[in-house]
Amino acid sequence: MSDLNQAPRLNPAQQHLTDELGATRDERPSFRDDLRDHLRHELEEAIEPLLVDVKEPPLFVSKRDLMMIHGCEARFVAEQDVEFTWTVPMARGSVAHKAIELSVTWRGEPAPLDLVEGALDRLEQDDRSVGAFLRTLDEAQRAELAGAANDFVATFIETFPPLRRQWRPVAESRVRADLCDGGLALSGRVDLSLGQPEGNVAGKVLFDLKTGRPSLSHREDLRFYALLETLKTGVPPRLLVSYYLEAGQPDKEEVSEQTLWTAAQRVVDAVGKIIALTGPGPRPAMPTPSYGCRWCPAIDTCDEGRRFLARSDDDEDLPNL
């Protein structure tokens, strides 16, 4: 019989991720004391003049807003007037992430489906919109959702090393930065974080758990989270990881000051675009066709989007933008 106190043996995928993410203290970067103050000052100096045209402050900007406005302005504008509606495929991510959050503190070794059922039970009691949606599902729909989320959670458990408490795992961690005397709120929610800084030495690793193919926008999402983390604690994370569950592969990026300044400039550019498109006397939105056109509410009136989709139906090698 094996020693129950011994650390479990890792499979090759789990060991690969452990090896990829490990670092001694001497290998971790340190950052200057005033980095947070400089980032905040430069952001506020660039954004403050733009906020005079905001109709109803504060202006809220999320990771999704950044992705949308830098992806296709026309789709961003079109979705402003569309009421969000939950579906079973859309709810899968919320349920799966809640299940992974429960796995951090659940005693013993629960089966993935136990975690999913626990997540569904808790989310159904939530007053937020996902809870209201879950309470409308019949048994067949609930079973479909549980099965889809179970696939996500089981794959995570199979390919990710068991989360040890000494790693300080935190799932679904909310982070926010209020700038310009409350005129702008930047917000995000990190799928999973491990570690913590020691003084000015970076120690935290931020993860975005992904299904499907890699996208150019995934690194940008994590850089935004790194910026928010720095504005909150003053110490950036040391590593950003997009973890692709279906492939069991991490895409990692080390964090530098340049990473943060690039993320800050992306926020400034996004705020300028959002205000120009939604403020008084808005300018026309520019379309940027991509595979996202398939889900755009303006596709019926967007010639560029329809032409792109017509071409993509005949070309399987188009890049994932």
Image: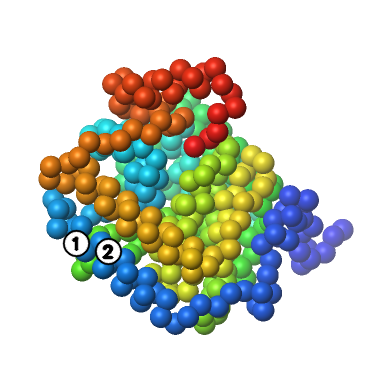
Q: Residue at x 36, y 24 (%)?
A: 304
Q: Do the residues labelled 1 and 2 touch (CB within 8 Å)?
A: yes
Looking at this view, name the residue that lies furthest to the right.
1
Q: Which colour scheme is used?
A: rainbow
Residue at image location 42% in from the left, 59% down from the top: 263
Under mark 2, the amino acid is: Ala
Secondary element at image label 2: helix
Q: Which is nearer the eye, 54 or 193? A: 54
User: Label 1: how many residues lie within 10 Å, few (<14), some (14-19) or many (20+)?
Assistant: few
Residue 196, image x, y percentages: 54, 72
Q: What element carries label 1?
A: helix
The answer to whether residue 109 is seen in the rendering is yes
Disc on res. 46: 2
From the image, tell me which residue sits under label 1.
49
The percent position of residue 147, horizontal first and vertical second, equals: 56, 33
Q: Where is residue 294 in the image (x, y as percent from the top left)?
A: 42, 26
- Count neighbours of disc 2 (C-alpha within 10 A) and say few if under 14, some if 14 to 19, many if 20 or more: some
Image coordinates for residue 259, horizontal then vertical, percent: 49, 63
Residue 288 higher or lower than 273, as above or below: above
Quarter of the image where the N terminus is located: bottom right
Q: Residue 312 carries which label?
A: none
Identify the amino acid type marked 1: Pro
- CA gap, disc 1 and disc 2: 7 Å
Q: Could you tell whether 308 is left or right of 109 in the image?
A: left
> Is 150 drawn above or below residue 179 in the view shown?
above
